[in-house]
Image (spheres, rainbow, N blue to C red):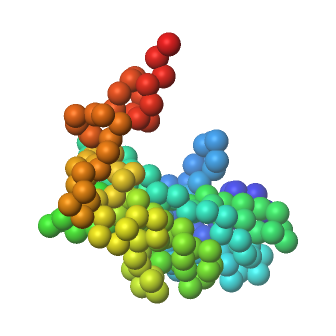
Amino acid sequence: MRFSEIVSSLAEEFGEETLVAADEAAIQPYIEVPAGEIAPVCRFLFEAPELFFDFLACITGVDNGPEKGTMEVIYHLNSIPFGHNLVIKVTVERSPGNDELPKVPTVSDIWRTADWHEREIYDLFGISFERHPDMRRILMPADWEGFPLRKDYREQLYYHGIKVAYEDREDPGKFPGNMQTGFDISL
């Protein structure tokens, strides 16, 4: 099934206004839906016999930075029997207010693989997934401060009273070299 046919099926089922954007010219063609619609859209993509997106390959978090004030959750879906794929994007505000975390409904009740992907995004980006059965950190310690893949993340100086070593840097928020990788690659 072609991208345009998938978009038409979604527009027919949910209405044109549900599709925030559809970009077939992108390197990976994608559709964008409002955060509140991601679960019903994914349920339809999974259950519709002509679509049958039975495989959630991955979910990725993206921080667009404090300047833009948004974050994204990107879903990569595949239909193994039909051989078609789809990328869905959801955009949320970085800080909806009062230091509240951005929220997106879970799709872990549709695809079990979403369970760990959503926990990883929560842990590293601070995007919470509503109705997730076990929304807790998966990579960082439970009491870790902040979300390490956010663009404004500041590394902790101490953890449980122990100074955290940062390769002899005075300011752990600054990276040596010309890249923000923590490695000096100058020759």
Q: Residue furthest front?
A: 162
The answer to which of 19 and 73 lies nearer the viewer is: 73
The count of marks equals 0
User: Could you tell me residue 39's position as x and y percent?
Assistant: 51, 78
Residue drawn at the location 64% of the way across and 42% of the way down: 27
Q: Residue furthest top?
A: 187
Residue drawn at the location 36% of the way across and 53% of the way down: 148
**Apparent side of residue 168 relative to residue 57 in the rendered image (left or right):** left
User: Could you tell me residue 175's position as x and y percent?
Assistant: 33, 32
The answer to which of 63 and 138 lies nearer the viewer is: 138
Residue drawn at the location 41% of the way across and 79% of the way down: 135
Q: Is residue 165 above or below residue 127?
A: above
Q: Is residue 180 above or below residue 16?
A: above
Res. 81 image quadrant = bottom right
Q: Does residue 20 appear in the picture of this structure?
A: no
User: Could you tell me residue 2's position as x and y percent?
Assistant: 76, 58
Q: Is residue 164 above or below residue 138?
A: above
The answer to which of 185 and 37 lies nearer the viewer is: 185
**Apparent side of residue 113 relative to residue 19 in the rendered image (left or right):** right
**Apparent side of residue 98 relative to residue 110 in the rendered image (left or right):** left
Q: Is residue 103 above or below residue 163?
A: below
Q: Does residue 42 appear in the picture of this structure?
A: yes
Q: Residue furthest left?
A: 98
Which quadrant would the N terminus be assigned to in this image? bottom right
The answer to which of 38 and 107 lies nearer the viewer is: 107
Residue drawn at the location 25% of the way across and 57% of the way down: 162
User: Could you tell me residue 153's position as x and y percent?
Assistant: 29, 49
**Apparent side of residue 161 relative to residue 114 in the rendered image (left or right):** left
